[in-house]
Image (cartoon, rainbow, N blue to C red):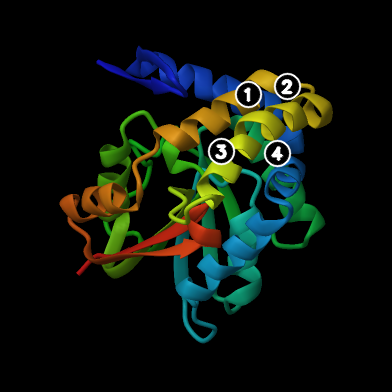
């Protein structure tokens, strides 16, 4: 069966290979490029997601952060949560995981954050293992979106929460046109200048446009068993935080 790799239709299995290649190439400068592409806003958006998560400080708490290889979200959770919190980063890309493991040591968070290689569509964890599941700017790269959401539901405990931060559909007139112009012209150029890789960032821009809008993604989350599904737009819908509960 076919899926999309940016604007290109490819075999589903081939998409994963090509996505892996993209992130092997950009791993060492991934977080730096996020700063350039979003003018630093990705930091504000991630902080907003952690505030919604509100990890407890007084009891054990297990979080699975998927497709977060460099640890950017996991470290935020670790700093916000209590000492008993444990965050597992699961990423299919070994280069991204390597960056995260190095950062965890430097930031003295290796005792709270561990790194596991795994596929979002077939998570290597038992049922009902985690109190929360987070994923930031990663789910649009998964070949089978609904299967990834289904796996999130499986590994969450009863009462667990799913939080997904992802680029979305701008819903402000004029701003949507400005954003499109910026995305398709500036971001691939930044990729060329900063990471010496225009093609990877061209794909990332196209993958944003192919991702379901807020309402369609909400429906996918609900269809896979989550309750009280909502979303919160950020910066006019440039990004959105989607939330669901396993009840």
The foreground one among 67 and 137 is 137
Q: Give the distance between the C-alpha atoms of the residues marked 3 and 4, in whole angstroms.
A: 21 Å
Task: Report the residue that reaches farthest toward the front.
Answer: 174
Dot 1 lies on which element?
Answer: helix
Q: Is residue 160 above or below residue 178?
A: below
Where does label 3 land, which residue? 180
Q: Which residue is mark 4?
A: 30
Q: Are marks 1 and 3 in contact (CB under 8 Å)?
A: no
Q: Position of residue 121 (x, y in %)?
A: 34, 36
Q: Is residue 192 left or right of residue 233?
A: right
From the image, tell me which residue sits under label 2: 197
Q: Position of residue 191 (x, y in %)?
A: 73, 29
Asked if the residue under mark 2 is in contact with the one under mark 1, i.e. CB atoms within 8 Å, the reply is yes
Q: Secondary structure at mark 4?
A: helix
| Tag in front: 2 or 4 | 2
Neighbor class of circle 4 (other Cα within 10 Å; few <14, some 14-19, many 20+) is some
Q: CA distance from mark 1 to mark 2?
A: 6 Å
Residue for point 39% across, 39% down: 120
193 vs 238: above or below: above
Lower sequence index among marks 1 and 4: 4
Residue at the (78%, 28%) spot, across then down: 195
Q: Distance from label 1 to label 3 (Cα)?
A: 17 Å
Residue in the foreground of this view, choosing between 224 and 94 = 224
Residue 232 picture location, percent across and down: 42, 66
Q: Secondary structure at mark 3?
A: helix
Q: Looking at the image, tell me whether mark 2 or mark 4 is earlier in sequence order.
A: 4
Q: Quadrant of residue 111?
A: bottom right
Q: Earlier in the sequence, mark 2 or mark 3?
A: 3
Residue 111 appears in the picture as rendered:
no
Q: Which residue is mark 1?
A: 200
């Amino acid at each position: 069966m076919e899926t999309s790799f940016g604007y290109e239709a490819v075999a589903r299995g081939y998409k994963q290979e090509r996505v892996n290649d993209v992130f092997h190439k950009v791993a060492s400068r991934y977080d730096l490029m996020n700063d350039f592409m979003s003018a630093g806003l990705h930091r504000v958006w991630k902080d907003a997601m952690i505030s919604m998560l509100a990890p407890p400080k007084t009891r054990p708490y297990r979080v699975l952060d998927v497709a977060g290889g460099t640890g950017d979200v996991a470290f935020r959770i670790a700093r916000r949560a209590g000492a008993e919190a444990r965050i597992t980063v699961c990423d299919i890309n070994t280069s991204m995981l390597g960056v995260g493991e190095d950062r965890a040591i430097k930031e003295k968070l290796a005792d709270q954050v561990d790194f596991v290689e795994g596929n979002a569509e077939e998570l290597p964890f038992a049922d009902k293992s985690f109190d929360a599941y987070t994923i930031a700017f990663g789910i649009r790269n998964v070949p089978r979106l609904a299967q990834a959401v289904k796996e999130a539901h499986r590994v969450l405990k009863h009462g667990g929460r799913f939080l997904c931060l992802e680029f979305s559909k701008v819903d402000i007139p004029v701003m949507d046109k400005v954003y499109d112009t910026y995305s398709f012209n500036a971001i691939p150029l930044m990729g060329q200048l900063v990471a010496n890789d225009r093609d990877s960032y061209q794909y990332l821009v196209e993958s944003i446009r192919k991702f379901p809008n807020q309402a369609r993604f909400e429906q996918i989350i609900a269809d896979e068993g989550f309750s009280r599904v909502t979303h919160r737009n950020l910066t006019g819908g440039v990004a959105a935080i989607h939330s669901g509960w396993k009840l």
